[in-house]
Amino acid sequence: MDTERNAEFLEEIKKKLNPDRLYHSLNVADEAKKLALHYGADEKKAFTAGLVHDIMKNTPKDEMLDFMLSHGIKLTDVEKANDKIWHAMAGEAYLRDEMHVTDEEILSAVRWHTTAKRHMTLLEKIVFTADFISADRSYPGVEDMRKKAYISLEEAMITGLEFTLCQRIQQGQPVSEESLFAYNTLVIERKN
């Protein structure tokens, strides 16, 4: 069972991540577990997904691109132009193909932790949100986001997506279609 392999996963991320990213991953794992307990999700899966969510984050971009292509990941034009999201796609493939993770919920939570997508599972929402509010985060508005996260994951996600989408637009960067779909879905569901 993949949730019983955290010691192995920790050793792997220690090899692949710099100290700051390792610290962040440990904090996301802890926050994901807390959110899972709060919302009645599987806390073991949440912890594991949080632990490994950034496993490819410190991989050089050219190596990550080669890895994705060699593992059959076909990038859209928007994905090619947005290398900030590559580590999520590469992370899922690395966990599946190199670490032999078989838990589809964990793999999917890693895959969608940066962009989100429409109709996310509870675990996917938890890891996405935990990444925004982990104890190591200190951006303006993080305290408000932390409060929202324990009232409504969906409201916290809307706030996180607004932040990400606005940042990409202000920087003149392409915006992930999946992020737009996720944002629109959450806003529409909120109104119903």
Image: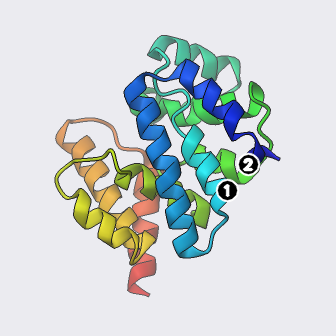
Residue 113 located left or right of residue 142: right
Identity of the residue drawn at 73% across and 48% down: 3
Identity of the residue drawn at 71% across and 31% down: 8
Q: Are marks 2 and 1 in contact (CB under 8 Å)?
A: yes
Identity of the residue drawn at 17% across and 42% down: 170
Question: In the rendered image, is residue 74 in sight?
Answer: no
Question: In the rendered image, is residue 175 in sight?
Answer: yes
Q: CA distance from mark 2 to mark 1?
A: 6 Å
Q: Which residue is mark 2?
A: 3
What amino acid is found at the position of numbered circle 2 in the picture? Thr
- Give the crowd class for mark 1: few <14, some 14-19, many >=20 residues within 10 Å: some
Q: Nearer the viewer, residue 110 or 89?
A: 110
Q: Position of residue 153 (x, y in %)?
A: 44, 70
Q: Position of residue 71 (x, y in %)?
A: 70, 23
Q: Position of residue 70 (x, y in %)?
A: 69, 17
What amino acid is found at the position of numbered circle 1 in the picture? Lys
Q: Is residue 167 above or below residue 10?
A: below
Identity of the residue drawn at 77% across and 45% down: 4
Q: Nearer the viewer, residue 21 or 153?
A: 21
Q: Nearer the viewer, residue 7 or 143?
A: 7
Mark sitting earlier along the chain (2/1): 2
| Mark sitting on residue 186 | none
- Give the crowd class for mark 2: few <14, some 14-19, many >=20 residues within 10 Å: some
Residue 183 located left or right of residue 100: left
State the quadrant of the C terminus. Answer: bottom left
Q: Position of residue 150 (x, y in %)?
A: 40, 73
Q: Which residue is mark 1?
A: 44
